[in-house]
């Protein structure tokens, strides 16, 4: 289900990243890979009164070869306008209104998107009156906040929440398998989508996704219903916008959130780069089933070892995703494409698979007998029983005498035993340890 998105826009130094961090807290967010950038996060999730939302810190968007402030800010605004349901326009209460604030204000105003105006650096009551001049920006009541002290965050989020769209019910029934096609620009996402759809019966073409940035295409094959969530079409809208590398990651994340299975496209011609790892990492962290699709295999020079070597390279680069199968295809020649949907069906089945409790406990007690749990200062963890608490992805809770005795390596051992006993190919799984003696 799509979450509402808040984008924080403003000129440099008003406190955007400070506010972003307040909203996101210590939840995981995108990790910046470039050195020398103070911002390490750009896109995260927050929660306010039980409502989850996405936050974008648009100040984190880097534009290659561009350092003019105003141009950078325009790109931010463009991004926010496209992506966000609500824009938080941040200004600096200590500095007052600057010409750059006015420019940004105009851009936002023209967008027609809901805007909430936050006046930051109002660190104490005495400074409250600094906010009045900001009425002239034309966005209604300015909300005084202090990112540094965490003051006013609730008021800001209350104001933003008013503009959250009503969450729609599940768009498609349980009988649909939702597929996100993700990967960096030019790996062949659009080509793959077209190649798949070219062969299938499209139920209704081109339904605009609720997030507006995806085109959903439901189709049917051999009685199984699918939806392809295609984010590639967006690209044509703005050149600068697309040029921001991070944007492709964000777009992928939104598609991933709504999907059951992620097709992680890899460019067979160019190999694996860091960005591929980020994109794949999101599918993993979101707990979605995943398949590595190595595309453009038609142009790769190969001998009898190439396929095996490439598979090994993928395994080396994506250590945490050893469950994801690999397929080598060509969207252009359609080589092996007929195998893809059956793999998707299998991954989706495993993603929603439930194992009976008594079978689970048999496997785990055998595992414990072969390799007993770790000890710490003479105390040994006692594993009492295990149960599967949910699916999508399969999630297991181990009840033990003392959860602090569970080690990462033992958890991995247990996961491997579960995978050896039951076929979870294609899906991540989650293991939790709880106290119960
Ligand atoms: P950004 O460039 O808009 O993301 O701004 P930052 O979040 O990096 O903040 C810019 C500067 O303003 C930093 O030195 C922050 O410590 C400071 N700052 C942020 N929020 C506040 C605040 O509420 N009060 C004060 N006094 N300083 C703040
Ligand atoms: P996207 O940005 O990921 O959507 O990538 P596109 O589908 O637009 O493809 C990028 C480029 O790669 C285009 O020029 C395609 O024609 C080309 N391309 C896509 N798939 C294949 C393939 O399997 N083989 C070859 N040789 N070229 C491909």
Image (spheres, helix red, strand yellow):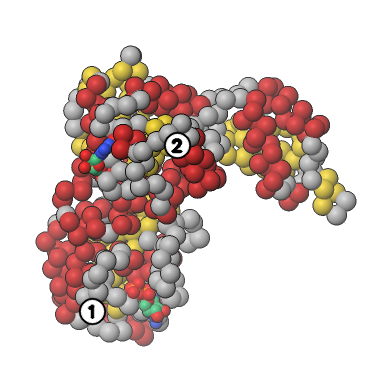
For the residues marked 2 and 1, what is the alpha-carbon distance in whole angstroms? Answer: 67 Å
Horizontally, residue 222 falls left or right of residue 321, namely left
Decide: few, some or many residues near mark 2? Use Cα within 10 Å; few <14, some 14-19, many ≥20. Answer: few
- 187 is higher (above) or lower (below) than 171: below
Nearer to me, 140 or 295? 295
Residue lying at 61% horizontally and 25% vertically, measured from the top left: 422
Nearer to me, 351 or 8? 351
According to the picture, the residue beneath numbered tag 1 turns out to be 132
Label whose residue precedes the other's in the sequence (2 or 1): 1
Q: Residue furthest right?
A: 378
Residue lying at 38% horizontally and 23% vertically, measured from the top left: 339
Q: Quadrant of residue 369?
A: top right
Rendering quadrant holding ligand 1: bottom left
Nearer to me, 272 or 298? 298
Decide: few, some or many residues near mark 1? Use Cα within 10 Å; few <14, some 14-19, many ≥20. Answer: some
According to the picture, the residue beneath numbered tag 2 turns out to be 306
Q: Residue furthest top?
A: 222
Q: Secondary structure at mark 1?
A: helix
Nearer to me, 315 or 175? 315
Horizontally, residue 283 falls left or right of residue 77, namely right
Kindly tell me whether residue 321 is visible in this rendering: no
Residue 267: % across, % down: 35, 43
Residue lying at 75% horizontally and 31% vertically, measured from the top left: 367
Quarter of the picture holding the N terminus: top left
Quarter of the picture holding the C terminus: top right
Q: Secondary structure at mark 2?
A: helix
Kindly tell me whether residue 355 is visible in this rendering: yes
Residue lying at 43% horizontally and 62% vertically, measured from the top left: 33
Horizontally, residue 103 falls left or right of residue 37, namely left
Q: Quadrant of residue 150?
A: bottom left
Residue 435: % across, % down: 72, 43
């Amino acid at each position: 289900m799509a979450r509402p998105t808040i984008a924080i826009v403003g000129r440099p130094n008003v406190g955007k990243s400070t506010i972003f961090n307040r909203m996101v807290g210590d939840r995981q967010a995108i990790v910046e890979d470039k050195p020398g950038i103070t911002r390490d996060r750009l896109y995260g999730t927050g929660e306010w009164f039980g409502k989850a939302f996405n936050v974008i810190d648009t100040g984190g968007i880097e534009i290659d070869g561009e350092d003019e402030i105003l141009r950078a800010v325009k790109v931010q605004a463009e991004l926010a306008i496209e992506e966000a349901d609500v824009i938080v326009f941040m200004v600096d209460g200590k500095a007052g209104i600057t010409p750059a604030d006015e420019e940004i204000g105009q851009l936002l105003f023209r967008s027609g998107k809901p805007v909430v105006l936050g006046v930051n650096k109002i660190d104490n009551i005495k400074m409250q009156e600094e906010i009045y001049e900001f009425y002239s920006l034309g966005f209604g009541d300015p909300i005084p906040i202090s990112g540094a002290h965490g003051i006013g965050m609730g008021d800001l989020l209350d104001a933003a929440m008013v503009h959250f769209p009503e969450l729609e019910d599940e768009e498609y029934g349980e009988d649909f398998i939702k597929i996100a096609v993700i990967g960096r620009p030019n790996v062949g996402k659009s080509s793959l989508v077209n190649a798949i759809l070219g062969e299938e019966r499209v139920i209704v073409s081109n339904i605009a996704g609720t997030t507006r940035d995806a085109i959903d295409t439901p189709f049917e094959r051999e009685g199984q219903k699918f939806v392809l969530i295609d984010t590639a079409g967006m690209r044509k809208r703005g050149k600068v916008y697309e040029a921001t590398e991070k944007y492709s990651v964000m777009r992928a994340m939104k598609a991933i959130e709504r999907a059951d299975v992620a097709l992680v496209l890899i460019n067979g011609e160019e190999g694996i780069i860091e960005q591929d790892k980020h994109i794949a990492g999101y599918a993993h962290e979101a707990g979605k089933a995943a398949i590595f699709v190595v595309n453009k295999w038609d142009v790769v020079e190969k001998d009898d070892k190439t396929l095996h070597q490439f598979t090994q390279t993928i395994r080396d680069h994506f250590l945490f995703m050893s469950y994801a199968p690999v397929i080598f295809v060509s969207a252009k020649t359609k080589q092996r494409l007929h195998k893809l949907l059956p793999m998707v069906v299998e991954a989706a089945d495993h993603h929603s698979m439930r194992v009976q409790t008594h079978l689970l406990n048999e496997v785990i007690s055998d595992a414990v007998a072969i390799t007993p749990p770790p000890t710490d200062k003479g105390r040994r963890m006692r594993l009492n029983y295990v149960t599967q608490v949910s699916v999508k992805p399969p999630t297991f809770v181990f009840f033990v005498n003392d959860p602090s005795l569970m080690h990462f390596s033992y958890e991995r051992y247990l996961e491997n035993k579960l995978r050896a006993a039951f076929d979870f190919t294609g899906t991540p799984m989650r293991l939790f340890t709880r106290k119960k003696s």
